[in-house]
Image: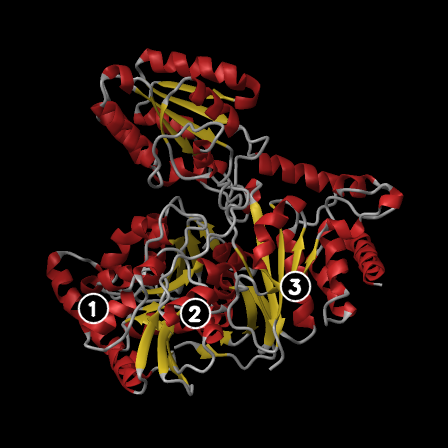
Amino acid sequence: MVQQSTKASAGLRRLLSGDEAVAAAARELGVSLGTGYPGTPSTEVLEYFATLGGRAQWAPNEKVAMEVGVGAAFAGARALVTMKHVGLNVAADVLFTAAYTNVQGGLVVVSADDPGMASSQNEQDNRRYAVAAGVPMFEPSDSQEAYEMTAAAFDVAERWHIPVILRLTTRLCHAKTLVDTGRFTASAPPETFVRDIPGRVMIPAYAKPAHRRLRAKLAEIAEWVETCAWTRTVEGSGRVGVITSGVSYAHVREAIADAPVLKLGMTHPVPIEAARAFAQTVDECIVIEEGDPYLEETLRAAGIAVRGKDPMYRFGELSVQRVRRILAGDTSAEPTPPRGNPPQLCPTCPHRLVFQALSRLNCIVSGDIGCYTLGVLPPFEAMDCCVCMGASIGAGLGLRHALPDEEARRVVSVIGDSTFVHSGLTGLVEMVYNPPTTGHLVMVLDNGTTAMTGLQEHPGTGRTLNHEPTNRLDIERVAEAIGIRRIHTVDPRELGSDGLETLIAETLASGELAMIVTRRPCALIEERVATAAAGACNE
Amino acid sequence: MSKVTNVVFAGLGGQGVLKVSDILADAAVHAGLDVKKSELHGMSQRGGSVSSDVRFGDEVFSPMIPEGEADYLVVLDETQVDVTRHLLREGGVLITPEVFYDEDQGIEDVDDLVADEDNPVTERNLNVALLGALSVRLDLPESCLLEGVRANLPERLHEMNLEVFQYGVSAARKRLS
C-alpha cells in the first residue's frame, strides 16, 4: 500500500511536465530501478528520475528494459519501465506473459503514445495493449494526476500482483502544469528472495491456472474501478454529458463549461456500470477520446447509448477547437494551418556527407529510425523505406533477395549506432546466416549518441544514462564475431562525400557481406562543447 | 473567474523559444496563478519551426491555446510571423524584434540589432529581450519575471539577461508612448 507522507516537504508546488511528475512520484515512492529506452515523448521520465537521485538506466531496447523491470519486481522491488508507444511493440512479448505471473513487487510500465505523430512513425493507440495483454491502465489528464496516478498504479500493481500501464500522451508528457509534490513515502526495499515457482515459471502446467488467475484479478479490478476515486463525475447543468479521459478531459472542460462529465482515470478495465448510470442522467452522452474509438466501442458493446466522434477526428491529437467541433457534430473540412519550417539534418551534421554519396550513387536505401531518417528529404531524397527500429537490415536483405541482381547490387542498409544496438544485431545475424547472392552492405552512421531523442547514451557510447563510464559495446568487433568479413571504419568528415562515394561503390562491387561504420560525433555534441566554452547561451 | 492570459512564443530551433516560455511560466507561478505551458519536443533541435504556449490565470484547463485565441504572439524570427499569425486573436498583440529597430540609429533589421554594440541584444539573449518588451503589457509583477529569469538561467548569465530584459522594457515603453 502506498503511504501518504506526513513530512514537512508535503505541499511543495512546482511546475512539472507529465514526464517529470511521474519521475517525482517514482522517486518519493522509493522505486528501486527505472529502466527503458529513449523515445519521444517518454525520454524525460528516466532522465528526471536520475536527476532526483533515482537509479535509472538505459537498456539496449524496450524488451530488455521490461525484462529487467520484471526481474526487479520478482525480487520484490518497485520497478518503473518507460518507453514510447512503439517501444511497447518491442516489449510486448514480455508484457503478455508477465501479466500471467504473480509479480511480487510493483511493476509499472509507462507507455507514452504520440497521437498526431509529433515525432513517431505511427499513431498506434496503446489502450488496445491493455485489453490484449489483460493489464490495468491509468491515464492522467495533467501533471498533478500523472504524479498521483504513478502512486495509484503501484498500489494496484502491488495489491493484485499484476503489471500496470501508465499511459501518457505527447501533450501530457511535455505540457507543464502545477504539481503538489512531497506526498508519498518510500516502500522498504526487499530483504530476501521469495520463491514462487507456479506463480512465475510459465510452463503450460502453471500458465493454465495463471491465465484463470489473471482473469479473476481483472474481474476484481473491474469491480473496484466502478467506485474508486479515479472514476469521477464533474457536475454540470447541461443536458449533454461527456465521457472522457486523459488530456482530452482538459480540452472538454474548456470547450463546454456546463456539461456534466464522467472522467475516467482508468481506461482498462472501463467502469461500465458507472458509465451506464451516468449516461442515464443526460439527454445525450458523447465520448471524447483521442485516437481509436476505444471507449466508444467498449461502451456501445455494453449496450450504453453514446455518440462518438466522426472518423475524421481519429487522426491527429485533439484540441479545444476540435472538441468543440466534435460536440457540435461538425464534419466540415478543418482549416489547414500554415506549414512552418520542417526539421532537417543540421548544417554541419556528418550524416549529410553519407546521404550525398548515396544519392549520387543512386543506391536503393533501406533506412531506419533516427535523425538520419531526414535523409529522405530534399536535397538528398536518399531513402527508399523506413518502417521501425532495426528494420533497415532485414528489409534491405529482403530487397536483395527479391530484386534482380543488377538492382540488388544497389541496395544499402543505413542504421544509426543506437538503433543498431537496439535491434540491428539480429538483422546482422540474419545477413550472415541467409546471405543474399549479391552480398550486402550495412552502413552504421555512428555519431556516438542517441541524437534524435536528445543525446542519450547507449551501450555503444560506453557511458551510462548519467554519462558515467561503463563497459562499451564495440560495434566492429561484434560485427566481426557475427561473421561480417569486410568492415571499414571511416570519419565521414575526413573522407568527404567523394571519398565515401568511392568506398561505397567499391564495397558494393565486391559482392561481400560488408559493413561501413562512419564515425563522427553528432554536430549537436560538438556545438554543445563549443557553446559551453564560449560561455553564453539562453537556450 | 478572471480571464486566462494566452501567450505564444515562436521561432526556430536553437533560438531559446522553450527557455523563454519556461521563464514566463515560472513568473506566473511566482505570481500565485494557475499556469499551463505546452510545446512539442523532439524535432525542434533540427532547425525546424518551434512554438510554445503559455497560459495563466485563476484556472487554466487545456495546456494548448486554441487557434485564434492568443492574446500575445512573440516571434523571435521574423520568417515565422506568417506561419503563426493565425494563432493570434482579433486585437491580439504581435511582438517581434522589430520593436527594437530604429532607423535613426541605422538599425533596420535583426542583423543590425545584434551587430550594434550600443545595445545589449545578441542572438542568444533576444528571447529575454523580447520577454522584457512583452512584460510591459502583462499583469505580472516585474519581480516575478526577474525571479523567472534567475530561476531558469545559470548564474553567470543573470547580469546580462537582467540588463537585456530592462532594455526590452524600455524599448516597449517608448513604443507605447
- CA separation, marks 1 and 3? 56 Å
**Chain at tag 3:** B
- CA separation, marks 3 and 2? 22 Å
Q: Classify A200 as above or below A302.
A: above
Horizontal and vertical percent position of residue A497: 51, 19
Q: Classify A497 as above or below A469.
A: above
The residue singled out by tag 3 in the image is: B92
What label does residue A324 carry, if any?
2
Dividing the picture into quarters, in which one does residue B70 lie? bottom right
Horizontal and vertical percent position of residue A119: 45, 48
Q: Nearer the viewer, mark 1 or mark 3?
A: 3
Horizontal and vertical percent position of residue A416: 43, 34
Disc 1 crowd, CA 10 A, few/some/many (<14, 14-19, 20+): many
Residue lying at 21% horizontally and 75% vertically, measured from the top left: A219
**Left or right of A346 on screen, residue A313:** left
Amino acid type, mark 1: Leu
**Chain at tag 1:** A
The answer to whether residue A150 is seen in the rendering is: yes
Under circle 2, the secondary element is helix
Amino acid type, mark 3: Gly
